[in-house]
């Protein structure tokens, strides 16, 4: 079994290329391409692809290009381990045809702009629609073309999900937008998916791939049965929604700068006391707390000092920002709906959170902290506010925007209230209990929250490039 649970099939790329069924379809596809070019008065020339070299005249009679043999093998191996394939850059549909033959259960969406963006390009506006029409007629339930630029087409797939969760991706169109392309399809990706980067010789494609790996969005393939994973022209990596969560381990904190952004004094112990105890000796950790205590609490006057004592005990730095006051933003209800609320309440449109009076302030403050402390890793609240605390949700979004703007690559959220795998820390109960002590007797976290001494989970969020949400 492979990463997506699909059993690999045995046929090699060579077997498929030599088969009568493939030859017959290839002949039909090439005829359709040639007929369209001839009718348009264009030379019989198409883009390079998995079968033929670039701009070869009479490609249909040229042999299969040797330099693409490894890429064909990898494409077939991916197809045989997948169910739903999206390709950007369909051109003559040769990679699509090979994948469809490699796995009869595979369904494919192709995306191609089909416009000659450069004068020296072959007549893509002519032969791409013709090739796609032939494929759509030959494989009516298994192939369709979206004629659009890469990001728009991928967003459409992410919204409409025409083939379900996507577990195979071939990015083979433009070279300068691969990160944005991954971001566009991300919501529709399966937990684990194969990503083939075409044109890997191009510097921007290599850079984008390295950045995807650094951000935990992709990783090297671990399947030892997979054939060749890369050469000059292509590279296969694993991606998918589960990949970021699986990409961080405790040793990854060693020697790093960590900024933990919390709404209230005590959140640092409640959600991350065990993690902080683990990483404080091996990383440079700063706690930034964004709300001052609400007036009228038993511990209004003592909470900030209690947090300072916790940080001193842990050996981490801290900063308390003065701008926001806990419980003062009653209007938050109009901006944030919680999963725990009845459906009719949740369905009611809420105002854009970015328009909340505190949002810009919190976000700018968080971004300032990120520039000041230059963290490798940022940790904050999650999008459901753990147990449904709206100020946690507000801070989550403010920090998330700040992290995107500041170029942070690793953003973790607390796991309470969220599903999904991530880094799990099992705190020593007595050690964690001791961290709650400075807040006693006014605030007893252990008595108040049933998860207070339970294992702590941290989920890594997918952070793409500099485009803030
Ligand atoms: C090298 S060919 C693809 C070959 C094909 N994947 C194969 O192996 O058979 C590149 C294709 O990408 C398309 N393309 C280039 N830039 C694009 C973009 N920004 N969005 C969508 N398609 C694009 C071109 O129209 C062209 O058909």
Image: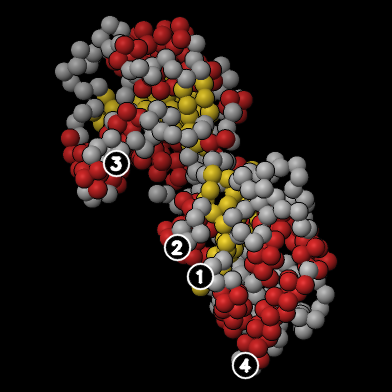
| Residue situated in front as seen by the camera: 126 or 23 | 23
Residue visible at 31% across and 11% down in the picture: 447
Q: Earlier in the sequence, mark 4 or mark 3?
A: 4
Using the rendered image of the protein, determine whether residue 271 is visible from the camera's viewpoint: yes
The numbered disc on residue 39 is 4
Secondary structure of the residue carrying tag 4 is: helix
Look at mark 2 in the image and give the residue it sits on.
Answer: 156
Picture layout, residue 25 above or below residue 275: below
Question: Around disc 2, counting alpha carbons within 10 Å, would you say few (fewer than 14), some (14 to 19), or many (20 or more)?
Answer: some
Which label sits in the foreground, 2 or 3?
2
Residue under the point 54% across and 68% down: 141
Mark 1 Cα shell of 10 Å, populated few (<14), some (14-19), many (≥20)? many
Residue 359 - label: 3
Mark 4 vs mark 1, CA separation in Å? 23 Å
**Measuring 74% from the left and 48% from the top, which residue is drawn there?**
226
Q: CA distance from mark 2 to mark 3?
A: 30 Å
Q: Position of residue 381 (x, y in %)?
A: 38, 32
x, y (%) of residue 123? 62, 83
Q: Which mark sits nearer the N-terminus, 4 or 2?
A: 4
Query: Where does the image place residue 105, in percent across and percent down from the top left?
Result: 61, 59
Measured in 3D between alpha carbons, the distance from the residue under mark 4 to the one under mark 2, in whole angstroms, is: 32 Å
Question: Mark 2 to mark 1: distance in Å?
Answer: 9 Å
The count of marks equals: 4
Crowding at label 3, few (<14), some or many (≥20) Cα neighbours within 10 Å?
Answer: some
| N-term mark: 2 or 1 | 1
**Spatial distance from mark 4 to mark 3, Cα to Cα?**
58 Å
Disc 4 versus disc 3: nearer the observer:
4
Element class at badge 3 = helix
Residue occupied by mark 1: 146
Q: Residue at x 80, y 71 (%)?
A: 64
């Amino acid at each position: 079994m492979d990463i997506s649970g699909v059993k690999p099939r045995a046929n090699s790329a060579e077997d498929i290329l030599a088969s009568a069924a493939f030859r017959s379809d290839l002949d039909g596809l090439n005829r359709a391409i040639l007929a369209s070019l001839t009718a348009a008065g264009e030379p019989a020339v198409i883009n390079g692809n998995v079968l033929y070299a670039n701009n070869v005249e009479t490609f249909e009679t040229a042999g299969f290009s040797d330099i693409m043999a490894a890429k064909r093998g990898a494409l077939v191996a991916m197809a045989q381990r997948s169910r739903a394939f999206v390709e950007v850059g369909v051109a003559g549909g040769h990679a699509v045809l090979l994948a469809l033959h490699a796995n009869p259960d595979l369904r494919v969406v192709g995306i191609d702009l089909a416009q000659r963006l450069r004068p020296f390009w072959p007549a893509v506006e002519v032969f791409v629609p013709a090739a796609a029409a032939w494929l759509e007629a030959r494989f009516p339930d298994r192939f369709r073309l979206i004629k659009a630029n890469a990001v728009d087409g991928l967003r459409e797939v992410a919204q409409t999900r025409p083939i379900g969760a996507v577990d195979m991706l071939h990015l083979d169109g433009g070279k300068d937008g691969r990160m944005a392309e991954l971001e566009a399809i991300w919501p529709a990706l399966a937990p684990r998916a194969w990503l083939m980067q075409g044109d890997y010789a191009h510097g921007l494609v290599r850079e984008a791939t390295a950045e995807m790996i650094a951000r935990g969005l992709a990783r090297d393939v671990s399947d030892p049965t997979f054939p060749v994973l890369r050469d000059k022209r292509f590279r296969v990596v694993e991606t998918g929604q589960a990949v970021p969560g699986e990409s961080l381990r405790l040793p990854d904190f060693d020697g790093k700068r960590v900024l933990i952004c919390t709404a209230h004094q005590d959140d640092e112990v409640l959600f991350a006391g065990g993690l902080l105890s683990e990483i404080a000796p091996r990383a440079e950790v700063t706690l930034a707390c964004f709300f001052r205590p609400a007036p009228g609490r038993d511990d209004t006057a003592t909470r900030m000092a209690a947090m300072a004592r916790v940080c001193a005990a842990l050996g981490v730095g801290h900063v308390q920002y003065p701008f926001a006051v806990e419980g003062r933003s009653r209007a938050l209800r109009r901006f944030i709906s919680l999963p725990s609320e009845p459906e009719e309440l949740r369905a009611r449109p809420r105002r854009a959170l970015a328009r909340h009076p505190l949002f810009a302030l919190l976000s700018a403050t968080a971004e300032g902290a990120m520039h000041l402390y230059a963290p490798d890793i940022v940790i904050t609240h999650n999008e459901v506010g753990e147990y449904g605390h709206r100020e946690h949700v507000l801070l989550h979004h403010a920090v998330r925007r700040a992290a995107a703007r500041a170029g942070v690559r690793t953003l973790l959220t607390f796991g309470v209230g969220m599903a999904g795998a991530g880094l799990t820390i099992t705190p020593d109960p007595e050690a964690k209990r001791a961290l709650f002590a400075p807040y006693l007797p006014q605030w007893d976290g252990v008595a108040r929250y049933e998860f207070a001494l339970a294992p702590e989970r941290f989920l890594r969020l997918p952070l793409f490039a500099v485009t803030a949400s």
